[in-house]
Image (cartoon, rainbow, N blue to C red):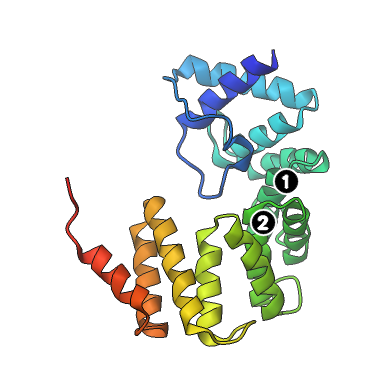
Amino acid sequence: MRVRLISVALALWMAGACMAAPRPAFAQAGNWVRPVTPEDVVHAVQWVEYSAEQGMSWAEYMLGTLYETGRGVTRDPARAAGWYTRAAAQGEAPAAYRLGLLYYRGEGVAQSDGTALEWFRHAADQELSEAQAALGDMYAFGRGVAQDAAIAVGWWRQAADGGIADARFNLGMAAAYGRGLEVDPRRAGEWLYAAALHFMQQGQPDQVARCLQAMRQAVPDHPLTAQLADRLSAPETP
């Protein structure tokens, strides 16, 4: 039964547009995709709702994402927050992270940097890289906590190790301008270049251009700056 629930639920998940935020709970489910009809969507929502009402944390989280994005249901951030809260209470780190984002934005809940910080920390303590990056941002800008560049760098390092491109970019800028660590142009160029490569893989050309602009301004003489510029100017091979 659980295999059936996961299969039909993932059919719904894969049918919609990708969320801007990560989907770590399902990243290891496999790379298969099958055609999805309107009937599939209806059945998927029914199965997810049934499973969530039975207290299955993965279904509570998935139902939260459906209400947050409006896929298969009427969009309702407040209901999304409710399901995320239930899933997070059972240890679903992605649900805690999404809940933190809702509090950060004030979407479906009263805006609260402090509450957002608590949920980000809850997910970060479970080694969710996206939440670690978010915590770094909170400390960097003093949102819900005293501003502390060194602590921000610490969280960004963990997120960068987990493959978060924005965290690599932030580390590069921190190394270039000495924010939270010593100025290190060599390391700055390496971090910014690593971020650019990751953004390339994700198909985000605007973010790649942002990395190149930052490198030209912060570390113009770094060999990787010219290498990235050459890579972007080279014609694509068919």
**Regarding mark 1 in the picture, which secondary structure is present there?**
helix
Q: CA distance from mark 2 to mark 1?
A: 9 Å
Q: Is residue 97 left or right of residue 38?
A: right
Q: Is residue 145 left or right of residue 194?
A: right
Residue nearer the viewer, 110 or 69: 69
Residue 148 at x, y = what percent?
Answer: 71, 79
Label 1 CA crowd tier, 10 Å (few <14, some 14–19, many 20+): many
Looking at the image, do the residues carrying marks 2 and 1 touch, with CB atoms under 8 Å apart? Answer: yes
Label 2 CA crowd tier, 10 Å (few <14, some 14–19, many 20+): many
Name the residue type under label 2: Ala
Q: Quadrant of residue 225?
A: bottom left
Q: Quadrant of residue 156?
A: bottom right
Q: Vertically, is 91 above or below 97?
A: above
Residue 150 visible from this viewpoint: yes
Residue 190 at x, y = what percent?
Answer: 46, 72
The residue that disc 2 covers is: 131
Q: Residue at x 44, y 17 (%)?
A: 37
Q: Which mark is residue 93?
A: 1
Residue 52 at x, y = what percent?
Answer: 74, 27
Residue 124 at x, y = what percent?
Answer: 72, 56
Q: Residue at x 34, y 67 (%)?
A: 209
Q: Residue at x 73, y 22 (%)?
A: 51
| Marks 2 and 1, the one that precedes in the sequence | 1
Residue nearer the viewer, 89 or 126: 126
Residue lying furthest right? 89
Q: Vertically, is 173 above or below 203?
A: below
